[in-house]
Amino acid sequence: MIEERILLSHGAGGKKSSELTERIFLKYFSDPALLDLNDMAVLELPAGRVSMSTDTYVVDPIFFPGGDIGSLAVHGTVNDVAMAGAVPVAISVAFILEEGLPLIDLERIAGSMALAAAEAGVRIVTADTKVVPRGAADKVFINTTGIGIIPDGINVSGACARIGDRILLSGTIGDHGIAIASARDGIAFKTTVKSDSAPLNWMISELITTLGKDIHVLRDPTRGGLATVLCEIASQSSVGVKIEETAIPVKEAVKGACELLGYDPLYLANEGKLVGVTAPEASGRALEIMKGSKYGQDACIIGEITGDNRQKVILKTAMGGSRLVDKLSGEMLPRIC
Amino acid sequence: MKYLDEYRDPKVAKSLVDRIHKSAFRIAQNQDGPVKIMEICGSHTVAIFRAGIKALLPDNVVLVSGPGCPVCVTAMEDMDRMIALSDSSRGNDVIVATFGDMIRVPGTKTSLEREKARGADVRIATTPLDALNWALENPQKQVVFLGVGFETTSPTIGASVLRAREAGFDNFFVYPAFKLLPPALTSLLESPDFAIDGFLCPGHVSVMLGADAYKPVAEKYGKPCVITGFEPLDILLGISVLCEQLANNTHEVKNAYGRAVTDLGNRKAMSVLHEVFQPADAPWRGLGIIPASGLAFRAKFSEFDAMKRFGLEEVKTGSEPRGCACGQVLRGVIDPVECPLFGNECTPESPVGSCMVSSEGSCAAWYRYS
């Protein structure tokens, strides 16, 4: 049997395009707004401020331990929308497909997106497909744009950290970065680590509902890792950030891979973790809520917001010393020796 | 974690720090001013900053970074030649295979990273075996592995040459820009502005070289040497043993990395190295040419020499960037922050000198962690 692959004609807007839409996308994306097959979705939204976010996913490899580019594209945008304290409602999906992509891979990705959207409780309401000649893209790129509704009175932003606030982390760092590295050509190594890619919106909803204004900042430490997010909070809020190395959870396998490659887990990407900054009196309850979620069982308090060293992140090391934590510069590369 | 957390125990760290302070007190009674300890290795530099070790030391014990980052010491002329390999206008169909950090190092006009963005086939390898595989998979192309590194990495590259010969490869080459540690140490010790009291010797290189390799430094130059691993406790132990020697005014080679380093080193790896390569004068960034401090192909392996195969001696090269003080930083004469370019024209995002490029470079470590 000849393996079916994406052809340029699948993107030409004619019969082949319709066939692709019906055979794959409508099989997995069945929202009424999408089934209308218009060029837009018409939605009725509840009242409130809208959180909107767009992101494009170009991960290599497209299938990796713990996930794939499809679920990642849904989780990533759902989480970005939710980090404003919003309840995600709907997302759009745009595919850029490389000529030659096996149809079976596209089907696997679409199915994974549908499952991820269902778990997050968001609708996939409009979609688009383009096909580019072989070599003009790397297998598949996905753009997702999401919208969500921010409850009244909630103001969560990187600029809202206050002196005395506690910094919470919802679990171990670096899992996604190491899972991707382990599957990547040129570095490939065996590990038990799986990507942490996950929707965090339910955990965030509970935090917002229970703690309200006591949640000041929510961020997901994706590319650039925990270090970069903390630097951004320090800068946006013009405060000092003080964290404890011993309080930051890192899986043993991630630690080992980092030693091997010369990586610092603080800079590794995460796709299912959040950093929360809360009023000190709310931190205990926030921790309980995180731990009560299946995606926050390793949650912990990793530090606090200070009035010292404004716009800087200071790490107290396990040895008792301290050092500056800067943003990631460039790309992390395996060390030479 | 087994074999990791054991070397990061804060209680043990505290007892080692106490020992360092006691030795430092005795040192202060015998001499004015601080003692300067050079960590030769870039991995040590990064580990020291990451663990915040400098903040734990007494004021009269100062750590100075040395010329042990192989990326940092790669001379501009080598950089320009390696970049020239990626230039498609030379008419070569070449895959340039390199360890990661090298791609960002600027030559006089461009870098491997920029040439890659222009379409050159530059690939990051984690071992020379990756390059051998690329040579096998791409028989129509010529694969050049950029041979950068100290005794830690060069034996594996020598082994890849032996394997290439055994398998009959005619499209695999190595650009030999290797460096040898002992001649560099001798050169530093004989330079007039060098004022270091003792050395933390690199664990990885010492696994290959063996502890005895440092005996001349200790005996002829009267400088204590302590071989040290890379975990925070390894480094504190190394500093502690070194400070005890400085307090007692002794100068011996001590091995504080006994779980990995023997007196004689890895003879098998070194014999592979010497089967393929022989010592040769080599240019070092900022330090000039140091006699017998590099490696050249032995005549019987010359067909693997990228320098000869691609006529790279002819590549035009320029001088080091104006104002760049990498040389003084590498000799431990100044701290990175004393370089006029540090943090202004020269940052990790836009490096001028090689010490700011490599993640193990002393300027990059100072910039990121302090």
Image (cartoon, rainbow, N blue to C red):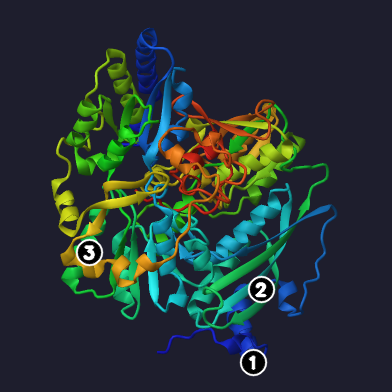
Question: Helix or strand or loop: what does disc 3 sit on?
Answer: helix
x, y (%) of residue B209? 21, 42
Q: Name which residue lies at 30% across and 41% down.
A: B184
Residue B161, label in figure: 3
Q: Name which residue lies at 53% across and 61% down.
A: B109
Tell whether label 3 touches label 1 (CB within 8 Å): no
Question: Helix or strand or loop: what does disc 1 sit on?
Answer: helix
- Which amino acid type corresponds to the residue marked 3 in the rendered image? Val
- Please indicate whether residue B14 sits to the left or right of residue A326 in the image: left
Residue identifier under label 1: A15
Report the mark closest to the observer, 2 or 3: 3
Q: Residues within 10 Å of mark 3 (few under 14, many from 20)?
A: many
x, y (%) of residue B297? 22, 61
Q: Residue furthest top?
A: B29
Residue identifier under label 2: A30
Quadrant into which the C terminus of chain B falls? top right
